[in-house]
Amino acid sequence: MAKDLLIGSHVAMNGPDYYLGSVKEAISYNATTFMFYTGAPQNSYRKPLNELKIEEGRALLKEHGFDENKIVVHAPYIINPANKNRPDLLELTNKTLISELRRTYAFGAKILVLHPGNHLGLGAEEAIQTLVENLDTIFSQDGTDVRIAIETMAGNGSEIGTGCEDAKKILDLCHYPERLGVCLDTCHVHDAGYNVNEVDDLLAEFDRIIGLDRLLVVHVNDSKNIRGAHKDRHENLGYGEIGFEALCKLANHPLLRDVPKILETPYINEKAPYSDEIRMLRDEKFIDGWKDKYLA
Ligand code: FE
Ligand code: FE
Ligand code: ZN
């Protein structure tokens, strides 16, 4: 099997095996990388690191040739680091993010994906300013070399960070630019209005505004909604409005060779679709009706 494509999916981290289980799950999909949350995605409660079988997981992933520099952690999405309305919450948000950076480092990973947040009616400019101030505070108190990848968002509700320009602004304004990069989510940019089917144009645009060297992660998802819908509902590969061809071209693009590609497509009948989706991307071949066996 060709192991060159840097592709994986988000994986769970549950007891009793925790990180060891996450690595096993990634291996079961024939993945070469993966993404995980260091606890529940929807809250900031976190189990102590010494209970998470990190050593065992790291030993197993090294045995299987995973590159830890390309393993991705996703920050809990409950936090809103762009929220200026609630200074009381901001302290908790920053504490959570500093702790997430430390936790990411403890797992041996180097990339932490972060949703830039919502402006909640205060306007995008103000929110971006708040986000940058918080990032500066966080980085000034953090001694790790973990980089935060700001995820491109679909523009659902008052989400900020919907396009290359927003990401560029955040990267430029932050006083720790070497600590920041971008996570491009194909469903989100499609929903934000970008044409993901023009893969080369999309990458050229990203390169022109942000620079491809700042692209740390790609989330490979099809979208349930039409371009520009600002919805953010992921679909399985080939079953959405983007389609397999473009997503496959992007995942295999030579310019993205060293960028981890992560699937966040939905489970089908409570079963993970990732081994099939990874195989199709690796073979660069869509299998008609591949979902059927999950639905049977
Ligand atoms: Fe995300
Ligand atoms: Fe995503
Ligand atoms: Zn999404």
Image: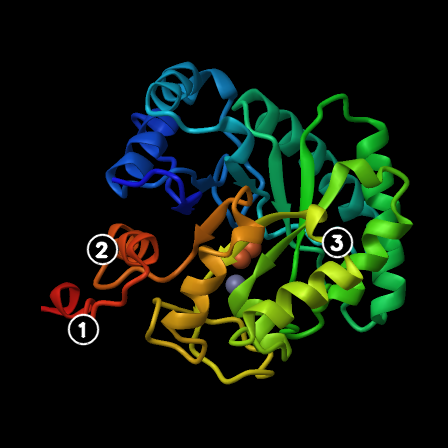
**Left or right relative to 139: residue 296:** left
Residue type marked 2: Lys
Within 10 Å of the Cα at label 3, are there few (<14), some (14-19), or many (20+) other Cα atoms? some
Q: What residue is shown with label 1?
A: 289
Q: Is residue 148 above or below residue 235?
A: above
Quadrant assignment for the C terminus: bottom left
Q: What residue is shown with label 2?
A: 271
Marks 1 and 3, the one that precedes in the sequence: 3
**Left or right relative to 155: residue 37:** left
Foreground: 188 or 141? 188
Give x and y (percent) for residue 233.
Answer: 47, 71
Give x and y (percent) for residue 246.
Answer: 45, 70
Q: Secondary structure at mark 1?
A: loop
Q: What residue is shown with label 3?
A: 211
Give x and y (percent) for residue 26.
Answer: 33, 38
- Quarter residue 120 falls in: bottom right
The answer to whether one can see residue 84 in this image is no
